[in-house]
Image (spheres, rainbow, N blue to C red):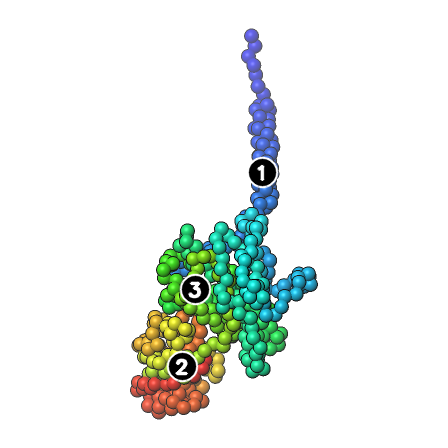
Amino acid sequence: MAPITTSREEFDEIPTVVGIFSAFGLVFTVSLFAWICCQRKSSKSNKTPPYKFVHVLKGVDIYPENLNSKKKFGADDKNEVKNKPAVPKNSLHLDLEKRDLNGNFPKTNLKPGSPSDLENATPKLFLEGEKESVSPESLKSSTSLTSEEKQEKLGTLFFSLEYNFERKAFVVNIKEARGLPAMDEQSMTSDPYIKMTILPEKKHKVKTRVLRKTLDPAFDETFTFYGIPYTQIQELALHFTILSFDRFSRDDIIGEVLIPLSGIELSEGKMLMNREIIKRNVRSSGRGELLISLCYQSTTNTLTVVVLKARHLPKSDVSGLSDPYVKVNLYHAKKRISKKKTHVKKCTPNAVFNELFVFDIPCEGLEDISVEFLVLDSERGSRNEVIGQLVLGAAAEGTGGEHWKEICDYPRRQIAKWHVLCDG
C-alpha cells in the first residue's frame, strides 16, 4: 500500500481557509449582537416609567410625587384658556387633578358643603382613600380694596397640606401663585420660585424649580417630610418666601407667607389653602453692627483684616434665628482682586468670629484700595441672603472713612472699630 503524501502547498492552504472561516464567524457574531442590542433599546424606549425623583436633605427624604404633566412650565396654553369656562375673580379655582403611576385619572368625588361655602368658592376636590377638608379661611373671598392696597398687592399663593399616617409623613403641595408683580422692568415679567422652611428649627428647607417669564406660575410640586410625628405638627409653622430669579445679581424677594399650623386639623385628610402674599417684613430698625480690626504693613505692603464680632443682627426670617458669616472682598480701582470668608455661626444674632485674613496690596499705598464686608445668612441649597454691608476705604463715608484714614496715618498698628451695617 503506497503511503499518503501531502504536498507543502496543501499545508499552506489550511491556515488560509481557517482564517477565512474565523473572519466570517466574527462578522456574524458582531452583527447578531448589534441586532439584539437594537431590539432591547427599542423595547425599552416604548416603556414610559413614572416620573419620580428623590431629594435627601439633612436626613429627610423629600419625594415630589404625582407631578402633573399639565401646567408644568407655568404658562397656560392659549387654546386651553379659550376652552375653559370663565371663573369669577372672587372664587378659589385650583386644578387639583392627579394621575396615578400608570397615567390614569382617579375618580373624582366632591365633598358636599354648605350653600355659603359653594357661593364663595368652587374648588375641584379629589379623594385618595381619605376624606378631605377645606379650611374656612381659605374660602374667604377677596373684599374690595382701596387704591393703595391694590398697588401693594403681591399676589396669592395656593397650596395644600396633608398628613400621611401610614408613612408618618407631613406632605406639602405647592400648587401655584397668581397675580405676582413684575420684577423685570424691561420684559414686565418675573422668573418666580418659592423657598419653604419648616419653623422653628429651620431644619427642613426646600425650594421649587424656577419658572421663566410668568406672573402666574403653576409649580404643582409635592414635598414629603418623613420623621415628623403628628403630635408635633401643631407646634410648627410654614414660612414661604416668593422670589424672582436674577441671573446677574441677587434674586429679588417678592414677598412671604407665614402659616402657623396650630389649630389646623389634618386628621380628616388633605386641606386646601390659599394666602395673600405680603411684603417682606424688616424686623429690625437697623442691620446690626460689625467689629473690624485693620493693620497696614507698609514694609511688606500687606493689609491684615480681622473680623472680630457681629451684634444686633436682624432676624433673617420669622424664626428669628440667623446663621451668619462674613464675606470679605478686596477691591483695587473698583475691581475685585481677592475674596475671603469666615466660618458660619449657627443660630445667633450676636456672632463671634475672630478670624484673620492677610491681603497682598498690588500698589504702593491704600489710595485705590477698598474692602467690602458682606454679612450673609447661610441657606442650605439656595442663595444666601445678605443681612448687611460695610465698605471701608478712602472714599467711604462716616466711620468707614475715619477707620481707613487712621490705618493710613498709623501703619503697623492694629486698629479696631465698630461699624453700623447698611442694606446690602
**Quarter that holds the N terminus:** top right
Res. 331 image quadrant? bottom left
Q: Nearer the viewer, mark 3 or mark 1?
A: 3
**Residue 141 placement (x, y as % from top left):** 55, 70
As helix, strand or loop, the secondary structure at mark 3 comes to loop
Q: Residue at (57%, 53%) from the top-left corner?
A: 108
Which residue is labeled 3 in the image?
264
Q: Which of marks 2 and 3 is in front?
A: 3
Q: Which of marks 2 and 3 is nearer the N terminus?
A: 3
Whether residue 421 sits left or right of residue 276 in the image: it is left
What amino acid is labelled 1 in the image? Answer: Ile
Q: Which mark is residue 36?
A: 1
Pointer 2 local density, CA inside 10 Å: few below 14, some 14–19, many at least 20: few
Q: Residue at (57%, 19%) from the top-left corner?
A: 6
CA distance for labels 2 and 3: 30 Å
Q: Nearer the viewer, residue 2 or 322?
A: 322
**Residue 123 placement (x, y as % from top left):** 57, 62
Pointer 3 local density, CA inside 10 Å: few below 14, some 14–19, many at least 20: few
What amino acid is labelled 2 in the image? Answer: Ser
Instruction: Judge whether residue 371 can be spotted in this image.
Output: no
**Residue 227 placement (x, y as % from top left):** 38, 57
Pointer 1 local density, CA inside 10 Å: few below 14, some 14–19, many at least 20: few
